């Protein structure tokens, strides 16, 4: 068996190691370890084949808003992944890169947070209908509510960064997205927030009610590539 074929086989075994069937998972992990020893793989090789990227189901506007960037920044921080924005038929799609299972969970979490944010912000904005409050004030209050909601929601995300950022992340990103200007994206993600109102606290309380559970097998058709 060639080295490349061995890497592919090991990657498949590691994927099966996440099976809900305990015996199947244990057998897959034992097989992966035997192949690692047989082919003399170094730890760096093993860590690299565990990397993956997963696309979100949500399509984003071509001009990505600051709120979307805040969600991405929060998920990157909590999951120990890194996001890239790729073009898709005139729109954008986020892809999360990192340890394979973290990337899957990060994309899943993004879809939930983005959907809930739109629903909650829409309801808050509609609450001003017929109130006589001017549009400038409504816009400022909605902005503050949104910022607070995101602050609270992102606090609810699980922290999977116990082992820190994978040292092979940059190598993997360079290989998968060699033409992407990641520095420009990082600069955008650090943009400052606008002026806040007391609605920030209201939004935060509602955001803290968000529930994000790890997707179970078959819950979504995640696009996981290596």
Image: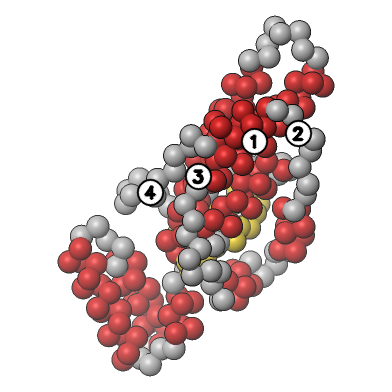
Judged left or right of residue 61, residue 76 is left
Q: Disc 4 vs disc 1: which is toward the camera?
A: 1
Q: Disc 4 vs disc 3: which is toward the camera?
A: 3
User: Where 56 sits versus 139, above or below?
Assistant: below
Q: Identify the residue under disc 1.
A: 148
Label 3 or label 2, whichever comes before in sequence order: 3
The CA distance from mark 3 to mark 2 is 21 Å
The CA distance from mark 1 to mark 3 is 13 Å
- Label 4 secondary element: loop
Judged left or right of residue 149, residue 28 is left
Label 1 or label 2, whichever comes before in sequence order: 1
Residue that appears at 61% across and 28% down: 202
Evaluate if marks 1 and 2 touch, with contact meaning CB atoms under 8 Å apart. yes
Residue 90 shows in the view: no
Label 1 neighbourhood size at 10 Å, few (<14), some (14-19), many (20+)? many
Q: Identify the residue under disc 2.
A: 196
Label 4 or label 3, whichever comes before in sequence order: 3
**Disc sitting over residue 156 in the figure:** 3
Label 4 or label 2, whichever comes before in sequence order: 2
Q: Identify the residue under disc 4.
A: 215
The CA distance from mark 4 to mark 2 is 34 Å
User: Where 13 sits versus 160, above or below?
Assistant: below
- Label 1 secondary element: helix
């Amino acid at each position: 068996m060639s080295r490349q074929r061995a890497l592919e086989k090991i990657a498949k075994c590691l994927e099966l190691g996440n099976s809900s069937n305990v015996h199947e998972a244990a057998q897959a992990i034992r097989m992966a370890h035997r192949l690692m020893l047989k082919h003399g793989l170094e730890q760096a090789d093993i860590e690299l084949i565990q990397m993956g990227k997963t696309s979100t189901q949500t399509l984003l506007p071509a001009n990505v808003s600051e709120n979307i960037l805040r969600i991405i920044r929060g998920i990157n921080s909590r999951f120990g992944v890194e996001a890239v924005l790729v073009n898709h038929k005139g729109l954008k799609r986020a892809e999360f890169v990192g340890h394979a299972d973290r990337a899957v969970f990060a994309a899943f979490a993004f879809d939930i947070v983005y959907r809930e944010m739109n629903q909650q912000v829409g309801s808050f904005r509609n609450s001003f209908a017929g109130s006589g409050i001017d549009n400038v004030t409504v816009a400022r209050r909605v902005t503050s509510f949104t910022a607070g909601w995101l602050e609270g929601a992102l606090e609810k995300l699980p922290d999977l960064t116990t082992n820190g950022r994978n040292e092979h992340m940059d190598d993997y990103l360079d290989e998968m997205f060699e033409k992407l200007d990641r520095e420009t994206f990082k600069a955008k993600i650090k943009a400052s927030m606008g002026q806040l109102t007391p609605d920030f606290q209201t939004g935060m309380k509602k955001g803290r009610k968000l529930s994000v559970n790890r997707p179970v097998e078959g819950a979504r058709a995640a696009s996981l590539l290596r």
